[in-house]
């Protein structure tokens, strides 16, 4: 289905004004538009084209609809167009970001979500490995039953990995094919709001991005909410029951084709069920969600990859330089998180700063001067020493993979040199050539090893993962090649 049209009456929550119109959902162009007809805007303002530009200020968190087929809630609606169709009769268009089907909701914040059903690409290859149902052949007269696996991620969150099978007729009564989807259901012990659901979904996307080194998108099929937080439901339920609400939400993906991808070669996944047992993947997911102290480091690492590759967009020298700086920032930050003395200095600094601020008795002038003048906590190491400490930490792994550490020995000194050049503007041009590219690959690889360490892998497991992954092997070959060219 490429398009869907829902005709009916549309109104704001609590308003008596109802306007005729149609909701247009274009699945191919990923557009949600509401088209209304009449003499007034939905806010009950009479349309006057002489000042219609002022109407661009009107945005609505929710517009409700009663259509011929279902009740509808359109979320985050923004006016985009008013045009005359005849004398004192107009067409008004709004753009929406999301549609909740078969329910009315007065406020998005009213939703109390207990479950959400999502789809991520490559999920079966990543989580099932050789046992992926996508790889299996089924007898013509048998369709497997849908199965699920429930995994506790945190005190409030469980993942339910669902294998869904559907029969689709190819020739009615003669032949059919079995369609397989691996879906992921987020289950919450305590209800959450929609923003928290999006944060959890994006967090899982980032784990797949780290594992697969591809930009990952996702699709939300439905959310389960308490019926008491709905203004209306087409389903007959009691106030104490939960209601599964299907939804149309395009902001989380750019193409349905990207979401429908199941298969990816095992050698291009750094972490997957191809090299680790499924219970180890469960542990990795748990650590990924609980390692809040490392979230910013994970983000720096993911941003260091060229997500524009294959899109035709150009990665400029300025962008590349900034990504190098971000990698060094991530390495420095990582070292500070394992530097016990520095952590103690930070705690003492914050405690003493708070005491002195209290002594200033709310004098904003003095407080601002104090905050602007005071230096941060005492540093135990300079940048070179921190980078050297991290290199020493991963050297045994590099030794196992390459048989030598020679290709990284100059990294601490050179990385410090180029970091200071870029930070202080001590350069004649933005393109710093092959030396910076080499440092970028070295920093990225070291950070890869350190992030694997945040999952509590031992050296033997990390070596196994690196040797199995073609992306890491290519990165190491780039480092070796560029080192030899520099020599």
Image (cartoon, rainbow, N blue to C red):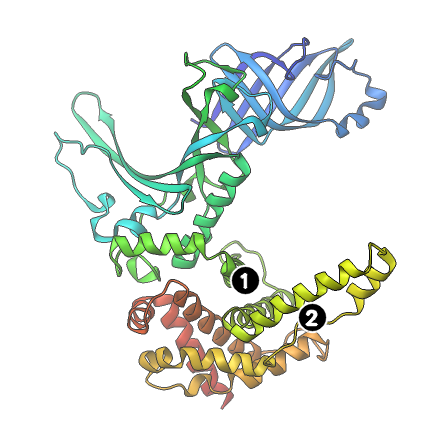
Residue 65 position (above or below residue 254): above
Front-most of 177 and 202?
Answer: 202
Instruction: Identify the residue at image location x=80%, y=27%.
Output: 53
Residue at the limit of the structure toward the right, as seen here: 365
Q: Is residue 313 left or right of residue 485?
A: right
Instruction: Identify the residue at image location x=35%, y=42%.
Output: 159
Front-most of 65 and 199?
Answer: 199
The spot of residue 372 in percent (x, y) is: 79, 65
The spot of residue 148 in percent (x, y) is: 26, 38
User: Which comes before the other along the chain, label 2 or label 1?
Assistant: 1
**Residue 178 shows up from this direction:** yes
Residue at numbered disc 1:
300
- Quadrant of res 160: top left
Front-most of 135 and 421?
Answer: 421
Residue 32 position (above or below residue 196): above
**Residue 321 shows up from this direction:** no
Say which of marks 2 and 1 sits in front.
2
Residue at numbered disc 2:
376
Callout 1 crowding tier (Cα within 10 Å): few <14, some 14–19, many ≥20: many
């Amino acid at each position: 289905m490429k398009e869907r049209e829902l005709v009916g009456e549309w109104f704001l929550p609590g308003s008596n004004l109802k306007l005729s119109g149609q909701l247009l959902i274009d699945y191919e162009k990923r557009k949600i538009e509401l088209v209304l007809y009449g003499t007034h805007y939905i806010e009950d303002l009479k349309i006057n084209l002489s000042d219609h530009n002022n109407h661009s200020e009107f945005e609505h968190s929710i517009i409700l609809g009663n259509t011929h087929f279902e009740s509808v809630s359109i979320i985050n609606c923004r006016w985009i167009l008013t045009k005359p169709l005849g004398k004192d009769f107009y067409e008004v268009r709004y753009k929406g970001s999301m549609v909740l089907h078969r329910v009315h909701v007065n406020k998005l914040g009213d939703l109390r979500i207990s479950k959400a059903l999502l789809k991520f690409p490559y999920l079966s290859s990543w989580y099932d490995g050789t046992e992926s149902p996508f790889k299996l052949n089924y007898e013509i007269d048998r369709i497997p039953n849908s199965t699920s696996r429930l995994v506790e991620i945190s005190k409030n969150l469980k993942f339910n990995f669902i294998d869904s099978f559907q029969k689709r007729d190819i020739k009615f009564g003669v032949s059919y094919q079995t369609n397989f989807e691996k879906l992921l259901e987020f289950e919450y012990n305590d209800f959450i709001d929609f923003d928290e659901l999006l944060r959890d979904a994006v967090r899982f996307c980032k784990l797949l991005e780290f594992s697969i080194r591809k930009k990952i998108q996702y699709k939300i099929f439905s959310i389960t909410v308490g019926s008491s937080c709905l203004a209306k439901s087409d389903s007959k339920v009691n106030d104490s029951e939960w209601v599964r609400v299907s939804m149309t939400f395009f902001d989380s993906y750019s193409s349905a084709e990207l979401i429908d991808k199941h298969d990816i070669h095992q050698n291009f996944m750094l972490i997957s069920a191809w090299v680790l047992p499924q219970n180890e993947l469960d542990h990795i997911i748990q650590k990924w969600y609980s390692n809040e102290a490392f979230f910013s480091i994970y983000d720096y690492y993911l941003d260091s990859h060229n997500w524009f590759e294959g899109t035709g967009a150009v990665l400029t020298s300025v962008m590349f330089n900034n990504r190098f700086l971000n990698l060094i920032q991530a390495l420095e930050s990582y070292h500070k998180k394992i530097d016990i003395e520095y952590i103690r200095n930070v705690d003492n600094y914050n405690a003493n700063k708070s005491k002195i601020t209290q002594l200033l008795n709310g004098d904003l002038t003095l407080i601002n001067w104090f905050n602007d003048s005071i230096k941060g906590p005492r540093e135990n190491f300079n940048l070179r020493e921190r980078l050297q400490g991290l290199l020493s930490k991963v050297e045994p792994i590099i030794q196992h993979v390459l048989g030598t550490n020679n290709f990284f020995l100059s990294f601490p000194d050179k990385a410090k040199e180029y970091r200071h050049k870029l930070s202080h503007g001590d350069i004649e041009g933005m393109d710093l050539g092959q030396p910076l590219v080499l440092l970028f690959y070295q920093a990225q690889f070291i950070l890869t090893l350190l992030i694997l360490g945040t999952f509590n892998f031992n050296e033997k497991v990390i070596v196994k993962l690196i040797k199995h992954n073609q992306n890491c092997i290519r990165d190491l070959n780039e480092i070796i090649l560029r080192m030899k060219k520099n020599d």
